[in-house]
Amino acid sequence: MELLPTQLAAVIRHALQAAQAAGDLPPFDLPETIPVTRSAKPELGDYASPVAMQLAKAARRKPLEIAQAIAAHVDTSADFVQSFEAAPPGFLNIRLSDAWLRAQIDAMIAAGDDVFALEIGRGQKAQVECVSANPTGPITVGRTRGGVIGSTMANLLAALGYTVEMEYYFNNAGRQMQLLGLSLQARYRQALGQPVDLPEGGYQGDYLVDIARELVEQHGDALKDESWEYFKGQAEAAMFRRIRASLDRINIHFDVFFNENSTYEDGSVWKVLEGLEERGYVYRAVNREGAPPEEIAKTPPDAKDAVWFRSTKLGDDEDRVLVKSNGEPTYALPDIAYHIHKLERGFTYLINVLGTDHIIEAQTVARGLQVLGYDPEPVHVLLHQFVTLVEGGETRRMSTRRGEYVTLDELVEDVGADVVRYFILGRSPNSHLEFDLDLARQQANENPVYYIQNAHVRCAGIFRQAEERGLTDEGADLSLLGERELAFVRKLLEMPEVMVQAYEDLGPHRLAFYALDLARMFHPMYDAVRVLHSDVPEDVAKARLRLYGAARVVFRRLLKLMGMSALEIM
């Protein structure tokens, strides 16, 4: 389908061309884009365009005269338009046809689960990378935010016609994974009754106690002499089983698990370094070029050279370390190699969902791709702020290392999967999220999840009751619907525009905002526009039942895009 603003812009363009051909407007170049937006004043129309004011200089006419000329030459064969009206100082107010609006009710029902499917990404491959936590512990609330945002964007991309893959990027090497292996080794020996302490800086969470207990149940004391590397492997496997199961509970499913270590194994990390160096973007020094005296003064006298990326040549504030003085690469090299791998897999649209503390990393990767001749344009970075849980007005602090955290599983058990998803989506990713546990636990209209899902429940309930009474919507005469019902249809038809805006802005919260707005319009209508009341004539009841059928389809689609359940009974 094509968006209404796009169709209306085409009508305006044709009207401008017709007005010029008739001599009612002078020759001038038409703009590449003609703006059409939802009207801020519905009483004046459904859409509005300020294009006449933008053309005043080129046409050497007053904006109102241009708007009047456009309105006079609008093609009246456009069945979705009822009227174009010129209004001071030069707006075009556009009203949709009532007959066309009624026809959209049947169109929405016929589309079913594919309602408002678009073709923006037709024939293209997209990838969403999110969560990407190393397997050192259970999925926490903080990591969950990126997963909910990412999976919603993946759902949205699929609705826009893309072929989508979800990917999880992780590293099972390094000091933290060594500590994980040592910690599980200690917990296993403790489970055997040995007086062993956790390693300094080790992981203290109860999840390792559980894994150790499982190992004892399966192997007894046969593993008592195994190395920390063995226990690292056991911990990683067990953690990933838990991570996948936890994410499955809130409809986050991955197609690919990509291990950062593979970029070392195939040598691509060092190829990146060679490529940057060949192009003159690498140097070796103890301190970065242009480092201030106070930074240099803090450098130990025996410090060794690091390898630096001369990213300031590409607009960066300072050069970035590629390889530390101890020979260990920073995040940048494997990340650049990983993104080259992504692009070479044929993805034309990529989303990386990252915490705001990763902004410098994302910029460095983009600059590295640019130097190496890859277009970073397909890589879109969606940054999100952190999450805090609030209960009784107090914030609960969390730390995975110390074992002081709330896991995703615990949160789902407490408030439910749908509530977790909506409360995360209900805030812009750019905003810090305070997850209000007290509100989340409520099963009342104050809880937006309950309020939105109850709209779908009510639609389903009407059809159950109608079936019990032998009423169907067969032969419904939709001309019997009133203005209140048509106003709701107009609101339903906003959804594809919301979808595109969420896509263009990388703002999945727009779906959540729209869902709540739609529910706020639905429930008062439901109370006033009855179907099964004894005072409602059967022909009117049929028309209204058909309307609620369309509402049911749209609410279901919207809930599914957000990864939530479309409940039939609450």
Image (cartoon, rainbow, N blue to C red):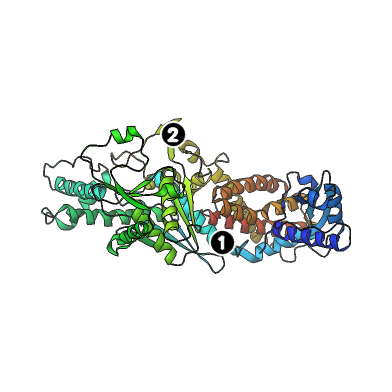
Q: Is residue 397 left or right of residue 438?
A: left
Task: Identify the secondary structure beneath mark 2.
Answer: strand
Residue 309 in the image: x percent, y percent?
A: 36, 50
Residue under the image location 36 percent in, 48 percent down: 139
Figure quadrant of residue 80: bottom right
Vertical comparison of 346 with 364: above or below: below
In this view, the residue farthest toward the bottom is 123
Say if residue 185 shows up in the picture: yes
Comparing 378 with 43, the one in front is 378
Residue 145 in the image: x percent, y percent?
A: 44, 47
Task: Identify the secondary structure beneath mark 1.
Answer: helix
Q: For mark 1, what is the residue?
A: 159
What's the CA distance linking mark 1 and mark 2?
36 Å
Q: Quadrant of the N terminus?
A: bottom right
Q: Which label lies toward us, 1 or 2?
A: 1
Q: For mark 2, what is the residue?
A: 391
Residue 238 in the image: x percent, y percent?
A: 27, 55
- The residue type indicated by label 2 comes to Glu
- The residue type indicated by label 1 comes to Ala
Which circle's residue, 1 or 2, is located before the other in the chain? 1
Identify the mark at residue 457; answer none if there is no mark.
Answer: none
Residue under the image location 24 percent in, 53 percent down: 235
Question: Label 2 neighbourhood size at 10 Å, few (<14), some (14-19), many (20+)?
Answer: some
In this view, the residue farthest toward the right is 23
Residue 277 in the image: x percent, y percent?
A: 34, 57
